[in-house]
């Protein structure tokens, strides 16, 4: 009897294996078909996105991550259905998990969406000098979640992409040539034209300052204690902006000192007027004072 049961079990297992093998082969063929489809279509899609002007990082994200994941996921689902797996229930479970993860990682998802927009809109690229979130520096790396910049103090700053997208951003490298404005004040008694001549001579040939467009000096404000000028020079690379600013400011101070042109410091002028006699003259006109009811002035 036991031998008979063993033969029955063996026949049942053999039948199950025989019935399962075609399904397994079909599942493998379906998944292989989707794998071949992925390999065949990746290159044309990448070439099309390149011709459309997409950034390389965005192309890698779309083709090597999103598109690849979508094709392989569909292939896996189709292959699982060939094996008789209840794909609908599995997808429903995955959907519930996805919703839970989405609520738990809202900030991360917001940064990733902002990173996608940065790659799409390309307001800056690696190597550009930008001012973002109150920080100035060179963009060294852009990821889907953060943007990393190297400041002038050689510090490494990581800024979430959502903060960059949500605030005003200044790209100092976008148009190549950049104008640097350096404020300089002179006293009201000084001649503006003389100061302009001295300042232009001081910045001529200064390291990092372009000859064309030529430097200029304009009046920017008539302040309380000074006439404020702007020494405007041009640079051909945004990386020179801060060094040139400091060079021009130092050269301007030295040149004005040599020319005897005063650079005033903020001050307050106070005038004191003696009003005692006028007060008593007015007081004498009052009836009570004229009647002698008020004490005489001492």
Image: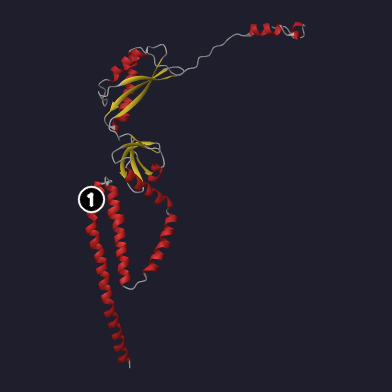
* Image: 110 above or below 193: below
Q: Give the quarter of the image for residue 68.
A: bottom left
Question: In front here: 177 or 2?
Answer: 177
Q: Give the quarter of the image for residue 278.
A: top right
Q: Which residue is mark 1?
A: 47
The residue shown at (38%, 67%) is: 90
Asked if residue 169 lies left or right of residue 201, the reply is right
The residue shown at (31%, 20%) is: 216
Asked if residue 96 lies left or right of residue 139, the reply is right
Question: In front here: 270 or 86?
Answer: 86
Secondary element under disc 1, as helix, strand or loop, is helix
Please provide percent x and percent y for residue 203: 29, 20
* Image: 35 above or below 123: below
The residue shown at (28%, 77%) is: 20
Q: How many marks?
A: 1
Question: In front here: 183 or 19?
Answer: 19
Q: Residues within 10 Å of mark 1 (few under 14, many from 20)?
A: few
Q: Quadrant of the C terminus?
A: top right
Q: Give the quarter of the image for residue 254.
A: top left
Q: Quadrant of the N terminus?
A: bottom left
Please provide percent x and percent y for residue 141: 31, 44
* Image: 95 above or below 140: below
Please provide percent x and percent y for residue 199: 32, 17
């Amino acid at each position: 009897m036991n031998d008979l049961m063993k033969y029955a079990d063996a026949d049942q297992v053999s039948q199950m294996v025989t019935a399962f093998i075609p399904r397994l082969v079909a599942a493998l063929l379906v998944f292989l078909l989707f794998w071949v489809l992925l390999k065949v279509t990746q290159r044309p899609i990448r070439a099309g996105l390149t011709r459309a002007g997409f950034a390389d990082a965005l192309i890698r994200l779309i083709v090597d991550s999103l598109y690849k994941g979508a094709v392989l996921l569909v292939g896996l689902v189709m292959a699982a259905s060939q094996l008789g797996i209840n794909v609908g229930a599995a997808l429903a479970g995955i959907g519930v998990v996805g919703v839970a993860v989405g609520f738990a990682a809202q900030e991360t998802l917001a940064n990733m969406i902002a990173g996608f927009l940065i790659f799409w809109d390309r307001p800056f690229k690696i190597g550009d000098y930008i001012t973002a979130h109150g920080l100035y520096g060179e963009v060294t790396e852009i990821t889907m979640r953060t943007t990393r910049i190297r400041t002038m103090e050689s510090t490494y700053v990581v800024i979430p992409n959502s903060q960059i997208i949500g605030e005003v951003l200044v790209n100092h490298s976008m148009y190549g040539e950049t104008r640097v404005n350096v404020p300089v004040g002179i006293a009201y008694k000084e001649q503006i034209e003389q100061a302009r001549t001295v300042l232009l001579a001081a910045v001529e040939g200064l390291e990092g300052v372009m000859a064309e467009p030529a430097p200029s000096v304009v009046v920017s404000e008539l302040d309380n204690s000074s006439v404020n000028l702007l020494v405007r020079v041009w640079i051909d690379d945004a990386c020179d902006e801060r060094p040139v600013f400091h060079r021009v400011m130092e050269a301007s101070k030295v040149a004005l000192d040599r020319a005897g042109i005063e650079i005033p410091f903020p001050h307050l002028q106070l005038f004191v007027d003696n009003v005692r006699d006028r007060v008593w003259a007015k007081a004498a006109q009052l009836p009570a004072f004229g009647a002698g009811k008020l004490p005489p002035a001492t």
